[in-house]
Amino acid sequence: YVPGSGSYHGAVAIEVLAAALMAAISVHLLLSLPDGRLTSPGRRIGAGAAYVAYLAAGAALAAAGHWPAAWLGVLAWSVGLLLALPAARMRYDHSAGRDRERLQWAAIGLVVSCGLALSVAVLYLLVDWPAPVAPVAASVMVLVPVGMAAGDVPRLGPRGGRLLVQVLAVAGFAVTVALIYLVVILGLGRPPSSSADRQLLGLSMVAAAVAAISFAPARERLTDWATRRVFGARQAPDEVLRTFGSRMTRAISMDELLLQLAESLRKTMALTSAEVYTGTGDVLERTAAVPDTGPRSLLVGGRERQVVARAGISGHAWASVWLPSLNGSGPDTGQLRVAPVSHAGELLGLIVVRRPVTADPFSAEDDRVLTELARQVGLAVHNARLDTALQTTLDELRKQADELRQSRARIVATADAERRRVERDLHDGAQQHLVALAVNLRLMRDLVGDDPETVTAMIDQLAEEVKSTIQELRDLAHGIYPPLLADSGLSEALAAAGRRSPLAVTVSADGIGRYGLEIESAVYFCCLEALQNAGKHAAGATVTIRIWEESGGLLFSVSDNGPGFEVAKAKNGHGYMNMADRLGA
């Protein structure tokens, strides 16, 4: 590669074609990340166009035997990458998991290599180093495959996102510094002419790069140091305001959050004490206090609540009028600030802070921080109460759902038991009578011609058995759904049930109209259940059944003068559950 030698033009042609092929391959690579496949016709067309364009330009330059200027080659290469960048960004937006991690690490390699190549070019333009610039700038592109390889390492993959953010920030700052140097040195001044000037400029650029990289961590540490010197804490007073919202989003209980707030206020504002009161109604309880002085309550009447809820940041004079009990919790001569915690005009609490009388007075900035903190605390307390109310409602709904499931199960079991009872009563009662009637009828047919007197006696006996069978069927039907209830209503049906009861029963149901089938059935069978229980446990007692209408509703009661019962035990009984299920349905 020596000008004038016999192989010079061949070497130039090979290098130009190799550079063109490298540029085309880089566009192809960018379009096919992260798996090396061109997944759409547009990507395949774009990659093919890059090969044709770059190789055609390289072939033309090779045939002419000219090596293009470095800036022209970098410009052509950069244009191809910029055209392919939207497609790579689209692939990143639609990727996830390992594919996204591979793309992140490939981007890290590309950004670092481009940043270093730009730095090399700027150094060469300003201080003529390093030379030759083109091979050095191209060699840093080895970081692109290095980044792609790092993306396939399982332990490194998940860290690519955070590292890419830092790399982009540093690269952006480096580009800014490079442009400033180019504008100031080449645009406003003149490039260095001597080696000493170039060395001095190079060292200044190195110093700028080191300052750019170390700026963020150095600023953070210096800010912490200065804050401790000025405020005696790691945070300025307004930093408490900025961090309170972020702490609310974490899984921290409200009491702990308010305690952290009181501690931060005491440290950052140089307070002797910081207290937070919360509560509803006429009593506010001290939820958090630094230093901890135990529980304490403030009584705030209805008239005072309205005034306090609408008040701003106030001091001793205002507190002595509307909250005089606050003066008893600290020296009257100290400085006091009271910030009402409210939401939508409702008083939810107070923030009370104190300083020694010899300390700096509360400034307008302190009052602004307290006002904004009180607003945020009010929102947090309001949201916490909404969460508590919602959780209580959910618990009640779960309880009701459980009770409903149990009630449905009991209803199904009761229905099955009733069907079995009806089947058993039919089998053991009416069916046996009907079978006996059939047998006697066949016997009468055999005796009708031989013994008329016996047949006549058997007919009388059959008549009595038919009556008995009819009565059993009536009793059975009465237990299922009494016809008297359907025909005459609750008053007549319950009166008939009282006459059948072994106890003395009085029914008071005057003026009761008719209701739906389900309502009358529920009331009727609940009263029968109560009569049955009284018959079992209150022998000889007098029972009173009362039914009346009130405010558009139907009410009933069954009472007796027997020994009584324990309600807690009765609620677990079968009869009580039957009544509850009927009324609940």
Image (tube, grey):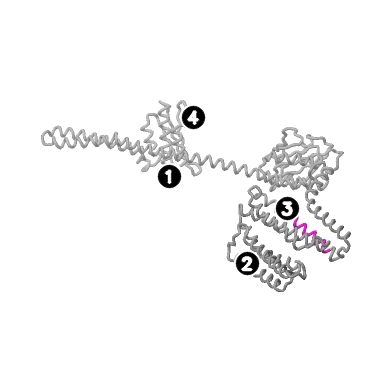
Measured in 3D between alpha carbons, the distance from the residue under mark 4 to the one under mark 2, in whole angstroms, is 84 Å
Residue topped by disc 2: 46
Query: Residue 440 appears at what percent x and percent y?
Result: 19, 35
Q: Quadrant of residue 22?
A: bottom right
Q: Quadrant of residue 298?
A: top right
State left or right for residue 357 relative to residue 499.
Answer: right
Query: Residue 287 appears at what percent x and percent y?
Result: 71, 37
Q: Secondary structure at mark 3?
A: helix
Q: Is residue 100 magenta?
A: no
51 relative to 143, above or below: below
Q: Which residues are magenta?
A: 164-183
Residue topped by disc 3: 166
Q: Secondary structure at mark 2?
A: helix
Residue topped by disc 1: 515
Measured in 3D between alpha carbons, the distance from the residue under mark 3 to the one under mark 1, in whole angstroms, is 78 Å
Residue 569, numbered label: 4
